[in-house]
């Protein structure tokens, strides 16, 4: 849906020309955006920290990047788990996306080293070469033993003084300073390790101090001043940075610029300045995620206050641009429209303190900011706070509303959506002036570059080819696909060039999927293109920018009691020594079936009367695995019965069938294997109907519900049971409503004896 207002201000007889130019301004973006539908992925995991030999549960949202609504355009989710220390891949699987959401699990093998990992999610419309920034990564940590977390808990962080080296940047609003008008300049100060640094100082005009400045939030601040022609301006920082001097950009003596006066929920107020000698026509546009929402045209002599209505404009980060009469951009900045437009999620537990194995009810209510109930698609999780990383600032709001539109790391992004922070409007405006300046993703240059990338790197389907080994004509028109248990089999078509595709529907058959052609095995070869090959070549996770917070001090009021690892479910052995290695077996039923066939169909060994491959040539029985047989080893093998033998020309052996690798077996029977969707697994939820149940329950994740839809009254109710772990549990509910509004709610549950 396109929101577009045309405002014509003081154009008089030039009104028709103004309308034509405004239409042209909108059409430029419309043409560039055509056919460029993009999906933005967001990941939520069941915890932040995992022990090895656990299941990692995840949910993914697939949202149309411009409309910010759940989209069904993508049907396949690519998931990778990468060890961050050496970029090594430890997991690659495909999962189905249904109506904009996907969920699944990953088994974290006990062999995985401790450390940080990236969980990465991609889809066909969230990843391309020109703009591969709408995929998502979630940082997780794997520890070998819960003792590691228990020892870590309670440690206070020691702040390292890194303020001797500082980064200080100045950002004129609109992009340049214009002489003899009031200009706004924002600034940001960071320490050497990238953390915000509060500063104060003085603005100098030549050698004369004219204004004091100081940061307001996270090292950011701003000041107003009227620069004069021909004069130099600089900021001198105060102690402990007393020797730091930063020059402002040169002053422009002519031109047009603008400044934001006020940002309300229903309207925007700008002042436009003109320092040209004559009246100047101008055009003004506000666009949100590439959708033009407001456009205005007018003429300005010295200055003009421009009021723009926001009644139907979408919420979120928007780009305001001032154009000259030839539609050349003169100044621009980012603004946030309708910060209060959020999905309000209210959560209420039946009890905030419960005993072990006690039933708990979680009530969820979703409304818009005006308290009107709305239907929403949510996910909920409750887990032991020992596995919670308080420095992880990523949630559905910070991801879609900030990270997808800004470049670089955003410190503590949750701050801007917390209604308890009374200065969040001013703080967010400073963030957009200092971090988002000229970094918006939906400008015309970015759209034009993306339009050249016509070939997606990822697909919802898996492509393959049926190749004829000789140069004859390919007469095969179909292939058979089936699962390991051979319970589901289907035919897929092959085109005249031998190409075929495994669609998302067919990828539900199994994982892996087996593919067999109908010709002689020596005449054809089936080749399946690895769906992850592009991702491995580009290593996109290396470009991931993750939001961050400093580690908070321990809150004694919310710290759970001292608990040993034994009370959380047992002890892990540091090392296991294997004294005897058992024979490996095929886990896949179909591979085991092929192995059995190979033993019978391809085995030329025969047994007779205790002999294996009797030299006289008789015997039609297949040998028995593990049985001892006599084998002729001497020269001049006899050809008929009877014949003499002794220890010098025979030996006894224990018979074993020939061993084939999986690849050998598949080739032997003319079969190819492909990935399918990873099998669905149900999250374990015990029901304790009898309180006297004495079996130990050491679940550290009490609730994982990735697919919750509130009813027309905005209500949903979940029931679950606590475990035997005495701890404080962290809970989170987040999601999106039918209008694209996003929300989250966090809470705690205390479990004790």
Image (cartoon, rainbow, N blue to C red):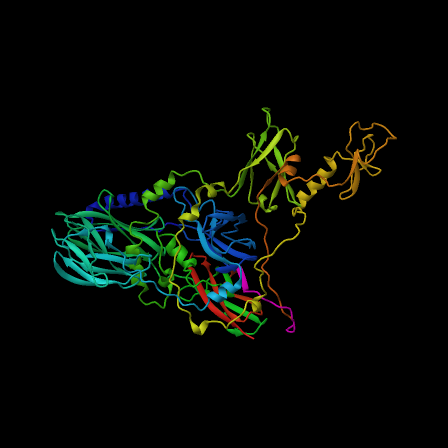
Residue 400: within the magenta? no
- Front-lying residue, 271 or 503: 503
User: In this view of the protein, can residue 365 be seen by the observer?
Assistant: no
User: What span is in magenta?
Assistant: 690-707
Q: Position of residue 468 (x, y in %)?
A: 59, 28
Which residue is depicted at the point 61% across and 46% down?
A: 510
The total of numbered circles placed on residues is 0
Identify the image quadrant of residue 188: bottom left
Q: Position of residue 115 (x, y in %)?
A: 48, 56
In the image, residue 33 lies at what x, y percent? 37, 44
Placement of 283 over or under 706, stated as above or below: above
Does residue 579 appear to the left or right of 115 in the view shown?
right
The C terminus: image quadrant:
bottom right
Magenta segment includes 703: yes
Task: Depth check: give the residue in front, 423 or 743.
Answer: 423
Eyeballing the image, is 254 above or below 682? above
Decide if residue 322 is in sight here: yes
Instruction: Spot the residue most to the front.
Output: 648
Left or right: 148 as drawn, with respect to 615: left
Rendered view: 347 above or below 263: below
Residue at 73 percent of width and 35 percent of height: 603
Coordinates of residue 131 in the picture (x, y in percent) = 39, 44
Residue, far right: 642
- Chief SS of the magenta region: loop
Q: 571 left or right of 326?
A: right
Question: Looking at the image, which residue is at 62% across and 36% down?
Answer: 479
């Amino acid at each position: 849906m396109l929101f577009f207002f045309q405002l014509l201000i003081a154009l008089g007889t030039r009104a028709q020309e103004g309308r034509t130019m405004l239409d042209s301004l909108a059409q430029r973006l419309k043409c560039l955006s055509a056919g460029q539908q993009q999906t933005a992925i967001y990941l939520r995991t069941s915890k932040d920290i995992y022990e090895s030999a656990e299941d990692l549960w995840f949910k993914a949202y697939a949202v149309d990047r411009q409309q910010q609504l759940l989209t069904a355009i993508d049907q396949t989710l690519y998931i990778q788990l990468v060890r961050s220390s050496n970029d090594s891949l430890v997991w690659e699987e495909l999962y189905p996306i249904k109506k904009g959401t996907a969920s699944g699990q990953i088994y974290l093998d006990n062999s995985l080293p401790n450390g940080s990992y990236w969980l990465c999610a991609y889809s066909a419309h969230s990843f391309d070469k020109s703009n591969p920034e709408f995929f998502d990564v979630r940082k997780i940590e794997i520890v070998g033993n819960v003792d590691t977390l228990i020892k870590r808990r309670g440690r206070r962080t020691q702040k390292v003084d890194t303020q001797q080296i500082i980064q200080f940047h100045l950002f004129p609003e609109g992009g340049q300073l214009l002489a003899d008008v009031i200009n706004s300049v924002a600034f940001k100060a960071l320490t050497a390790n990238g953390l915000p640094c509060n500063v104060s100082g003085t603005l100098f005009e030549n050698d004369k101090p004219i204004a004091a400045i100081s940061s307001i939030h996270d090292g950011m601040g701003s000041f107003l001043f009227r620069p004069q022609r021909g004069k130099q301006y600089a900021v001198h920082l105060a102690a402990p940075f007393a020797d730091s001097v930063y020059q402002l950009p040169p002053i422009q003596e002519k031109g047009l610029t603008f400044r934001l006066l006020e940002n309300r929920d229903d309207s925007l107020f700008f002042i436009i300045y003109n320092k040209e000698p004559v009246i100047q026509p101008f055009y003004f546009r506000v666009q949100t995620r590439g959708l033009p929402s407001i456009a205005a045209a007018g003429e300005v002599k010295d200055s003009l206050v421009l009021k723009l209505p926001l009644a139907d404009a979408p919420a979120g980060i928007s780009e305001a641009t001032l154009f000259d009469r030839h539609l050349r951009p003169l100044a621009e900045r980012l603004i946030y429209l309708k910060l209060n437009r959020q999905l309000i999620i209210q959560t209420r537990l039946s009890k905030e303190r419960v005993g072990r194995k006690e039933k708990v009810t979680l009530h969820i209510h979703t409304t818009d900011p005006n308290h009107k109930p709305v239907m929403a698609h949510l996910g909920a999780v409750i887990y032991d706070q020992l596995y919670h990383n308080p420095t992880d600032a990523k949630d559905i709001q910070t991801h879609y509303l900030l990270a997808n539109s800004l470049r670089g790391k955003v410190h503590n992004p949750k701050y801007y959506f917390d209604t308890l922070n009374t200065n969040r409007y001013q703080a967010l405006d400073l963030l957009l002036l200092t971090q988002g300046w000229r970094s918006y993703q939906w400008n015309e240059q970015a759209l034009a570059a993306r339009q050249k990338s016509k070939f997606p790197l990822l697909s919802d389907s898996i492509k393959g080819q049926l190749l004829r080994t000789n140069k004859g004509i390919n007469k095969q028109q179909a292939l058979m696909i089936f699962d390991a248990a051979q319970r589901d089999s289907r035919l897929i078509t092959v085109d005249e060039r031998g190409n075929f595709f495994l669609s998302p529907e067919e990828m539900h058959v199994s994982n892996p999927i087996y593919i067999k052609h109908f010709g002689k095995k020596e005449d054809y070869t089936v080749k399946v293109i690895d769906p992850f090959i592009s991702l491995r070549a580009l290593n996109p996770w290396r470009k991931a920018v993750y939001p961050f917070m400093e580690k908070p001090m321990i809150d004694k009021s919310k710290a759970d009691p001292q608990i040993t690892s034994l009370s959380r479910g047992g002890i892990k052995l540091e090392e296991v020594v294997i004294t005897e290695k058992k024979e490996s077996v095929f886990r896949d039923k179909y591979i085991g079936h092929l192995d059995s066939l190979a033993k019978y169909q391809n085995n030329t060994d025969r047994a007779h009367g205790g002999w294996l491959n009797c030299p006289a040539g008789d015997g039609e029985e297949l040998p028995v695995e593990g049985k001892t047989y006599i084998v002729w080893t001497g020269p001049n093998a006899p050809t008929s019965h009877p014949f003499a033998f002794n220890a010098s020309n025979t030996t006894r052996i224990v018979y074993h069938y020939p061993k084939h690798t999986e690849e050998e077996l598949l080739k032997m029977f003319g079969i190819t294997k492909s990935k399918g969707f990873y099998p669905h697994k149900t999250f374990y939820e015990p029901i304790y109907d009898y309180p006297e149940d004495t079996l130990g329950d050491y679940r550290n994740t009490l609730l994982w519900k990735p697919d919750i839809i509130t009813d027309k009254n905005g209500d949903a109710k979940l029931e679950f049971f606590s475990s035997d772990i005495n701890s404080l549990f962290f809970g989170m509910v987040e999601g999106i409503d039918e209008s694209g509004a996003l929300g989250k709610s966090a809470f705690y549950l205390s479990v004790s004896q």
